[in-house]
Amino acid sequence: MSYYEVYRQYKSFPFAEFLNGVTPFDVRRALQKEQKGPLDFLTLLSPAAAEPALLEEMAQKAHTLTEHNFGKTITLFTPLYLANICENACVYCGFNRTNHIGRCKLTLEEVAREGRAIRDEGIRHIIILTGESRAATPPSYIADCVRVLKQYVDSICIEVYSLEEDEYRMLFEAGVDAFTMFQETYNEDLYPKLHPSGPKHDYKKRLNSPELACRAGYHSVNLGALLGLDDWRKETFLTGMHAAYLMQKYPGTDCAVSLPRIRPCVGEGSFKPACDVDDAAIVQAMAAYRCFLPRLGITVSTRETPDFRDHLIGLGVTKMSAASVTEVGGHAGKPKTDGQFEISDPRNVEEMAAAIRAHGYQPVYKDWEPLRRDA
């Protein structure tokens, strides 16, 4: 069985009817359960659970579970864009191939400069990103970049186009140890309208990619839906079920989720989010994730404002980005391109670390040592 089969079981589920039928009693009953099932998770995502008193109860439970399972630590990372050349026509993205923006990819010498700049910023965990173009940024190019970057950082996560399992293994051998991929929307019927052409058009291939990374031996796998493309409650539930599936099937892989909201981007034109996702929704989704899956990692990026990110410390978040740029070549000097989207938190590493300490938590720059590939 793959997660697609699990998803199919929920495709015709009456989400609206269930969510609107949840009562405050149902929410408290779900909160009190030691082990929570899928319907308990969905109950915690209901409008009834958004009532201030209940949301506060859920937040307190999430706080306790987070400190019990992860301690008072927040891991820091930064994104590094290797390229923005893309073959997709995603209607909400600045990298859309029809957008008239500067396109480029870094040379290995430029990659080294970016790596040195990130090292000097104090970050030891990075996520490397490309547009989705196998021709412009083939797996061999990504592997070459990884080998260069391993001179400067300890942990490298990839967020690239869908690969084959042997390609994920090849990148693992090159030094990649973590994987991120957003399904964007789990709504199979809506998906092709948002991704009308390009390699990303294949819903099932993208949906099954995280499992291939697990099978390839990656230390951690991060999932997410781009909140705003469809009903955020349904998207959060299906993301959580995806995470639960991977955690059960691949216990040796750490699993995490992100909660990205749509941000303005170059060339987005008339695209408007289908669903409003306010701060309270993010808090509810994060608390529900933590109560359902206590060992789940939760990532919050610089899409969110400094004040809001600070208020999420202690609620459930375990990893946060700092010194973020979404332009190619943005760490070592003047960016070479426009960014993929606008960031909301421009703080550098020192400023982000100070904010974490101010909340009684410890910023972590390096939280584990990868196994030597030649050991």
Image (cartoon, grey):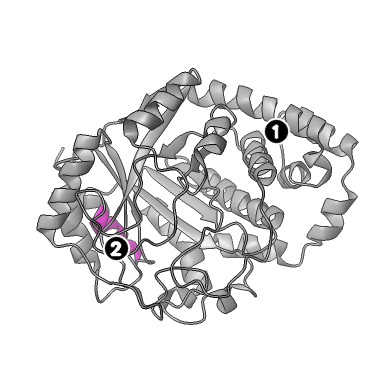
Q: Which residue is mark 1?
A: 35
Which region of the structure is painted magenta?
164-171
In the displayed structure, 107 sits above or below 223; it is: below
Place of residue 286 in the rendered image (x, y in percent of width and height, measured from the top left): 62, 40
Side of 176 relative to 244 (left or right): left
Left-right relation of 284 to 81: right
N-term mark: 1 or 2: 1
48 on left or right of 253: right
* Amino acid, disc 2: Asp
Callout 1 crowding tier (Cα within 10 Å): few <14, some 14–19, many ≥20: few
How many C-alpha atoms fall within 10 Å of the one at disc 2: few (<14), some, or many (≥20)?
A: few
Magenta span: helix, strand or loop, mainly? helix
Residue displayed at 77% across by 62% down: 13
Q: List the residue tagged with mark 2.
A: 166
Q: Residue at x 65, y 39 (%)?
A: 283
- Dot 2 falls on a residue whose secondary structure is helix
| Residue found at the far left of this picture | 109
The structure residue drawn at horizontal position 58% and vertical position 72%, both measured from the top left corner, is 271
Q: Amino acid at mark 1?
A: Gln
Q: CA distance from mark 1 to mark 2?
A: 36 Å
Residue 372 is covered by the magenta coloring: no
Front position in the image: 165 or 257: 257
Q: What is the x, y in percent for residue 312?
A: 57, 33
Q: Is residue 25 above or below residue 80?
A: above
Residue 310: x percent and y percent? 52, 31
Q: Position of residue 274 (x, y in %)?
A: 67, 66
- Identify whether 166 is placed above or below 269: above
